[in-house]
Structure formats: structure tokens, C-alpha cells
Image: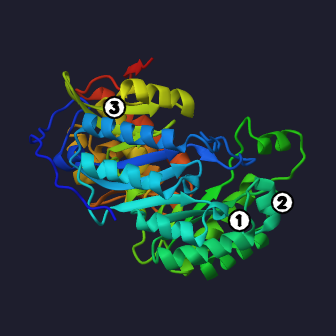
């Protein structure tokens, strides 16, 4: 098992402006996302950065993941990693020794608390009981299972490699190995899906699931097989009104089962929220490792401390070549100014049921207040009066009704924020400095 190492002494972090480090917790702690790029096959709906697994290069991938973790953690100078998330792709295809090697490097490079949340995404067909136990033994303490559907016909259309019985068996095994820390993903808006079949899926899922459920509406992405099927009218898909009803019904059914909707797509009971994903939604820094991974973290260099948005090279082979040559495979770096950081904070925080507090907002935006945004905009006041937004002494958040239509609320909020920002004494909101590597 992993043992946390003592944190190395680091000079105290100062509060500075201009998109730079603005607090000890923000600057000294980070979440880490590790991207495993391989799958057994490409699903018909998927346009993620994933590739068909090779049998001869895991040792090379492992070495590069470890090297990039070391490089980026040193670059960020974070003192503590609050959570690690192995996503993909299908990281449950990786050997447990690969997961262990990455965690050991993180533990060597910074402080990884013994109770840090370590999540692994798993597909049922690559997650036998013995392998799940091995993942637990190398440090994983939370599992996210890609169930997607409990209907074999749906799974066939989605191109999944597992059956409904495979999914049910994996969830049962995972709950024994990761009790209270097994999450399931399920999709709606599938071809031919009806309200009755969706309700049936949810009720069957609730008979077996643990304390965390993620709901995802099927999105048809150009270039996928599912998109081509729709273009050729080979499949019938639920219309927008029906998918909206599916979402609302799922929220109600999960709420009745004791789940709290703590984010637009995520539901938890008994406090089983995803701490890692909350880091994203609360605007905290995170380090992305692996092909195509994204990151947002403060970089220390000769120019000082600057928060950057970073994207790693997409394809595994070029990424590994760059890691071997430079210590990391960063392909693109964008220095974030205060306006960009605050805009992201607004968008992400409003995805959660708690929203953003006045205190947290003032720490980032001393000149534009949340109350000021609403005072300056009748449209925002109308949204509040219509029961979609709530602005009170605690801060700004969506109501239960507002979370369901969040996308329609963001445009007026961001438009008013940009107008208020440019009218204050702040810098212009756009023109970020971007560097493309190699």
C-alpha cells in the first residue's frame, strides 16, 4: 500500500493579481487527472481521445506517465495532491502495477494524504473481481463504472462490449470491494428509448447501485457512427422535449431514493460526492497527465507565478516521444487572466447546487460583486423572479428548476459579467497569450 511522504518545505505563497496565485489553498493543493488513452474498441457514440489498446507498449506508457507526473508536479510546486482520477479511455485495462507506479511517483513528488480520493474508471468487461481487488491493493479507493444501460439492445447500439448482466455483476462486486465509493454512469436519450423504458432502467439501477450516480444525455458528435446513423435516418432518436422529460423524471426518481443532485449530472447520497470533480466545479487547480489531458494550474517560472490552461499532445506515440525529450508532452499553453478565471468559475460553480459564495467571489473579483451584476441587469433580475436563480446572503446559485436549464442561464450571466468587468478599472477581458509547443 502507498504511504504518504512528508511535504517538502516551500516558500510561503504570496497573493498577487493578474491571473496569478491568489491563496494558499489554491496555490499549494491540486487535483491530478491521469488519462489512459486505450479502449478495447470505439463505441458508436464516442469522440473522446481514445485508441485501440496495444499489447506491447504498456511499460513505455507507464514510464511516460510517471515522468510527466514528476515534471508537472515540480513545475506547479504544489505541496499536496487532494485527489487523483484515472480516466480514459478505459483505465481498468491498465495493469494495477501501472496505477501503482503513477501513485507512487505522485507520493514521492508531493504530499498524497492517506485518505486522498483515488478514483478509477472501469468498464464491466475489463473489471473482474480479482482485478478490482488488485486495484484496491495498489491504492484505488473509488470506482466509477460505465454501466450506460441495463438493456442489452441499447448496449449493442452503443457499441459497448458488455451485457446488462456483466454490468450488474461488476457493480455488485465493486460495492463489496469499494463500499460506499462505487459510482455508476448511465445514459438517456438513446435510440428508441421511451419514458417507460428509461424509468425501468432507473428503478433496476437503484436496486443495485451504491451511493453515487452520474446521468449523461446522449450527444451525437460529428464523426461518430451514431451521428452517421442519424444523418441517414437509420435510427429514431427521442426529441428534445422527451429527453428533457427523461432528465426531469430521473432527478425526481433519484431524489425520492435519497440522492442529492449536487451537480447538473451527478447525484449522491450519504455524502458520497466526487471530491475530485468538485475540484473542477469549484475552480481549484488540477494537473492533467497523459495524452490529451487538460490542466489548470499555477506555474512557477522566471516570470513569477501564472495560472495556465494546458493541453497535452493527443496521440499516444507523439506524446511519449515528447515526454522522453522534454519531460512532458504539453502541446498548448494559455496564460489565463483574471477575467477568464472568473468566467470559468461562474460557469463551473453554477453547475453545482451550492453555487458560489460571496466570500469566494470577492477573493477573486474585488471590483465586480455578484449583487452588482444583478443590480445592473433587468434580465438577471427576471431570471431570479422566475425562480431560476437565487441570490441571497450566501451567494449565487441555481434553483432546482434552474439547474435543469442551466445552459440558457449562462449567456445572460456571462454577458453581464463581461459588461460590468470592462466598465470597471480592470484589464480588457480577452486576448489571452497562447503558446503552441513543438
Residue 84 in picture, x, y percent from top left:
39, 54
Q: Do the residues labelled 2 and 3 touch (CB within 8 Å)?
A: no
Residue at numbered disc 1: 149
Q: In the rendered view, does 386 fall on the left or right side of 396?
A: right
The structure residue drawn at horizontal position 81% and vertical position 53%, both measured from the top left corner, is 237
Residue 328 in picture, x, y percent from top left:
39, 31
Q: Are marks 3 and 1 in contact (CB under 8 Å)?
A: no
Give the position of the N terminus as an image quadrant.
Answer: bottom left
Q: In the rendered view, does 324 fall on the left or right side of 143?
A: left
The residues bearing labels 2 and 3 have C-alpha atoms spaced at a distance of 43 Å
Residue 332, can we see it?
Answer: no
Between discs 2 and 1, the one toward the N terminus: 1
What's the mark number on residue 308?
3
Residue at numbered disc 2: 192
Residue 312, can we see it?
Answer: yes
Residue toward you, 413 or 117: 117
Element at badge 3? strand
Element at badge 2? loop
What's the mark number on residue 100?
none
Q: Do the residues labelled 2 and 1 touch (CB within 8 Å)?
A: no
Q: In the rendered view, does 428 fall on the left or right side of 134?
A: left
Amino acid at each position: 500500500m502507498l504511504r504518504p511522504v512528508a511535504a517538502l518545505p516551500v516558500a510561503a505563497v504570496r497573493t498577487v493579481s493578474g491571473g496569478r496565485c491568489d491563496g494558499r489553498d489554491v496555490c499549494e493543493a491540486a487535483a491530478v487527472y491521469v488519462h489512459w488513452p486505450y479502449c478495447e474498441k470505439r463505441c458508436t457514440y464516442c469522440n473522446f481521445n481514445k485508441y485501440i489498446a496495444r499489447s506491447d507498449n504498456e511499460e513505455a506508457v507507464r514510464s511516460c506517465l510517471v515522468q510527466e507526473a514528476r515534471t508537472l508536479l515540480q513545475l506547479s510546486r504544489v505541496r499536496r495532491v487532494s485527489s487523483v482520477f484515472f480516466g480514459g479511455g478505459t483505465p481498468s485495462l491498465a495493469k494495477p502495477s501501472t496505477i501503482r507506479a503513477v501513485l507512487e511517483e505522485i507520493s514521492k513528488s508531493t504530499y498524497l494524504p492517506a485518505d486522498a480520493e483515488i478514483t478509477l474508471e472501469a468498464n464491466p468487461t475489463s473489471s473482474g473481481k480479482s482485478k478490482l481487488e488488485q486495484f484496491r491493493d495498489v491504492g484505488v479507493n473509488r470506482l466509477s463504472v460505465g454501466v450506460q444501460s441495463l438493456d442489452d439492445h441499447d448496449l449493442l447500439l452503443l457499441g459497448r462490449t458488455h451485457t446488462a448482466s456483466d454490468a450488474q455483476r461488476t457493480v455488485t462486486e465493486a460495492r463489496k470491494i469499494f463500499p460506499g465509493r462505487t459510482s455508476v454512469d448511465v445514459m438517456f436519450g438513446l435510440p428508441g428509448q421511451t419514458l417507460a423504458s428509461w424509468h425501468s432502467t432507473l428503478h433496476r439501477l437503484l436496486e443495485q447501485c451504491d451511493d453515487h450516480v452520474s446521468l449523461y444525455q446522449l450527444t451525437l458528435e460529428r464523426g461518430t457512427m451514431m451521428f452517421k446513423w442519424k444523418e441517414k435516418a437509420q435510427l429514431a432518436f427521442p426529441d428534445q422535449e422527451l429527453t428533457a422529460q427523461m432528465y426531469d423524471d430521473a432527478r425526481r426518481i433519484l431524489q425520492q431514493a435519497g440522492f442529492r443532485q449536487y451537480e447538473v449530472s451527478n447525484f449522491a447520497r450519504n455524502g458520497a460526492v466526487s471530491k475530485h470533480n468538485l475540484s473542477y466545479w469549484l475552480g481549484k487547480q488540477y494537473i492533467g497527465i497523459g495524452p490529451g489531458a487538460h490542466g489548470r494550474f499555477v506555474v512557477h517560472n522566471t516570470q513569477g507565478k501564472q495560472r495556465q490552461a494546458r493541453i497535452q499532445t493527443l496521440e499516444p506515440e507523439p506524446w511519449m516521444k515528447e515526454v522522453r525529450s522534454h519531460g512532458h508532452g504539453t502541446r498548448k499553453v494559455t496564460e489565463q487572466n483574471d477575467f477568464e478565471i472568473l468566467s470559468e468559475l461562474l460557469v463551473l460553480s453554477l453547475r453545482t447546487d451550492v453555487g458560489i459564495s460571496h466570500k469566494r467571489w470577492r477573493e477573486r473579483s474585488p471590483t465586480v460583486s455578484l449583487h452588482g451584476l444583478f443590480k445592473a441587469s433587468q434580465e438577471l433580475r427576471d431570471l431570479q423572479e422566475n425562480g431560476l436563480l437565487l441570490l441571497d446572503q450566501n451567494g449565487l446559485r441555481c434553483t432546482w428548476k434552474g439547474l435543469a436549464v442551466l445552459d440558457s442561464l449562462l449567456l445572460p450571466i456571462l454577458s453581464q459579467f463581461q459588461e460590468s468587468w470592462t466598465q470597471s478599472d480592470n484589464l480588457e477581458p480577452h486576448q489571452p497569450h497562447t503558446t503552441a509547443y513543438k
